[in-house]
Image (spheres, helix red, strand yellow):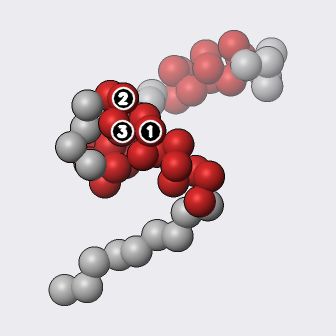
Amino acid sequence: MARPAIKLNPSLWDRIVRCAEAAGYSSPQEFIEHILEKELAKIEVTDSEEDVLKKLKGLGYIE
């Protein structure tokens, strides 16, 4: 099975490498996977309709 490839801006890649090293990850790939997992988990959590309304009110989108 072919592995996916993602093209990144060189300056972004440099930042990823620096942050991965500073945070103690074994590789930039491990760092990226960890960040993506965290962000996906946030999105995949389903909020109740009431929670969504509270968030929208808090952001000023609805009254």
The residue type indicated by label 3 comes to Ala
Q: Is residue 4 left or right of residue 59?
A: left
Q: Which mark is residue 54?
A: none
Q: Which element type, helix, strand or loop, lies under badge 3? A: helix
Q: Nearer the viewer, residue 48 or 13?
A: 13
Relative to 58, residue 23 above or below: below
Question: How far apart are the alpha carbons under marks 3 and 1?
Answer: 6 Å
Rendered residue at 36%/29% (across/down)? 22
**Can residue 12 be spotted in the picture?**
yes
Question: How far apart are the alpha carbons under marks 3 and 2?
Answer: 6 Å
Question: For mark 2, does the 10 Å Cα neighbourhood hold few (<14), some (14 to 19), or many (20 or more) residues?
Answer: few
Task: Please state the horizontal and vertical placement of residue 31, each as a whole percent of the image.
Answer: 32, 43
Which residue position is annotated with label 1? 18
The residue type indicated by label 2 comes to Ala
The quarter holding residue 53 reads top right
Task: Please state the horizontal and vertical placement of residue 20, each as a whole percent of the image.
Answer: 36, 38
Which residue position is annotated with label 3? 20
Rendered residue at 58%/50% (across/down)? 12
Relative to 56, residue 6 above or below: below
Q: Which element type, helix, strand or loop, lies under badge 1? A: helix
CB contact under 8 Å: marks 3 and 2: yes
CB contact under 8 Å: marks 2 and 1: yes
Which residue position is annotated with label 2? 22
